[in-house]
């Protein structure tokens, strides 16, 4: 399984011992040395490939199915002496400000840890280096591995919350900058990212609470460390709630500002239409009088009178002035 197994090693007395043989030899070696545990890291194994693991360790079929097909929410389940834990690591993409969700499925026993990773968002490589350089974590056995993984996942949550806050501040500046730009799609997109974040983070809280309350026998000696991780996670949870509320408020404010701008445009259009109509009325008055005198009738008033032409022009001017004053008084001009 060279492409599926990311790493495998036996840890005894704070020292890593590499495995050169197959999986069966690794389990036999760990059990033969007594107070040791084996950690095997897998990446998206198939059912056939995972059968090589289950042939050495008794794992519940339902948990194995969940680990292979993924798409589980964070949870902790007990199957006899084995713990099955699902975590959702996150990866923030700077180029698009998107959050990519991965999945880590852990099987923990007294002398083994089997980690199954799905997706690219995972902290396991760094976790191995951390515990291999910390004899205290290694001495805690599989519980120390679980603590280190949970701690790294929650630390990643904290970093991503900070990135979301930066994006949120930029959106707020854009909304209240005074320049009319439609930010509805960007606010909604960031709100979806926050929702995806909460879907990965929220269910982890009861998992850690279960451990902190001493209900997981395998992790009793590491409760203090898990309490610290839970405290960090609760702070992240509170911050995410604040971000979600701010995004809701920003969206409401943006929609209100958009409505105000649209009202301004509509009012300006109405004012322009009134002015156009007013000028059209001013032009229509002399046009009407000129149209009457432009008719080809033989008998028209003042048609052959010497003062008929200037009188008509004067009548046009007076009528235009009267209409203009009426329009000005009504506010149309």
Image: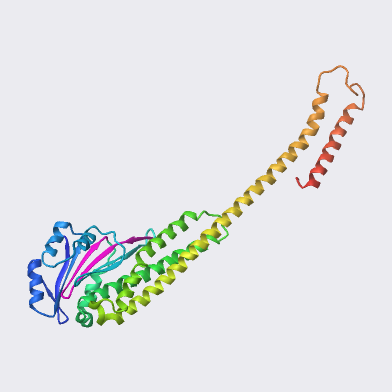
Instruction: Tally the numbered discs.
Output: 0
Residue at the front extreme, as displayed:
80
For image coordinates 42% across by 65% down, the residue present is 164
Residue 105 percent across, percent down from the top left: 24, 65
Q: Eyeballing the image, is 242 above or below 133?
A: above
Residue occupying the far top of the picture: 298
- Report the side of 92 relative to 13 (left or right): right
Is 111 magenta? The answer is yes
Horizontal side, residue 251 vs residue 307: left or right = left
Q: Is residue 5 left or right of residue 333?
A: left
Relative to residue 237, is residue 3 depicted above or below?
A: above
Q: Name the chief secondary structure element in magenta.
A: strand
Nearer-the-camera pick, 63 or 137: 63
Above or below for 230 versus 324: below
Q: Position of residue 254 (x, y in %)?
A: 54, 58
Residue 11 screen position, x and y as percent: 15, 77
Stretch of the chain drawn in magenta: 98-119
Q: Considering only vertical position in the picture, is 181 above or below 87?
A: above
Task: Please tell me in which quadrant of the rendered image residue 18 appears.
Answer: bottom left
x%, y% of residue 197?
38, 64
């Amino acid at each position: 399984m060279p492409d599926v197994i990311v790493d495998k090693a036996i840890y005894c007395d704070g020292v890593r011992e590499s495995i050169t043989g197959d999986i069966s030899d690794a389990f036999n070696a760990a059990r033969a040395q007594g107070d040791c545990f084996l950690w095997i890291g897998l990446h998206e194994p198939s059912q056939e490939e995972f059968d090589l693991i289950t042939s050495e360790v008794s794992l519940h079929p339902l948990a194995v199915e969940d680990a292979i097909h993924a798409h589980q929410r964070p949870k902790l389940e007990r199957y006899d002496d084995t713990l099955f834990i699902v975590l959702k690591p996150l990866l923030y993409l700077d180029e698009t400000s998107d959050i990519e969700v991965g999945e880590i499925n852990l099987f923990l026993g007294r002398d083994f840890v089997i980690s199954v990773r799905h997706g690219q968002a995972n902290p396991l490589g760094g976790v191995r280096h951390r515990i291999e350089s910390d004899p205290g974590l290694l001495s805690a056995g599989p519980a120390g591995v679980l603590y280190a993984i949970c701690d790294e996942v929650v630390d990643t949550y904290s970093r991503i919350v900070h990135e979301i806050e930066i994006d949120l501040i930029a959106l707020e500046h854009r909304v209240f900058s005074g320049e009319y730009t439609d930010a509805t799609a960007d606010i909604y997109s960031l709100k979806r990212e926050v929702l995806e974040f909460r879907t990965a983070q929220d269910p982890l809280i009861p998992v850690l609470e279960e451990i902190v309350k001493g209900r997981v026998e395998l992790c009793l000696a590491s409760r203090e460390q898990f309490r610290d991780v839970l405290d960090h996670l609760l702070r992240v949870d509170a911050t995410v709630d604040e971000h979600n509320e701010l995004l809701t408020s920003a969206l409401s404010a943006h929609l209100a500002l958009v409505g105000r701008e649209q009202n301004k445009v509509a009012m300006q259009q109405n004012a322009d239409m009134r002015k156009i109509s007013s000028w059209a009325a001013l032009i229509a008055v002399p046009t009407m009088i000129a149209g009457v005198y432009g008719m080809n009738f033989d008998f028209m008033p003042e048609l052959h009178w010497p003062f008929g032409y200037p009188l008509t022009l004067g009548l046009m001017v007076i009528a235009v002035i009267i209409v203009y004053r009426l329009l000005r008084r009504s506010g149309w001009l």
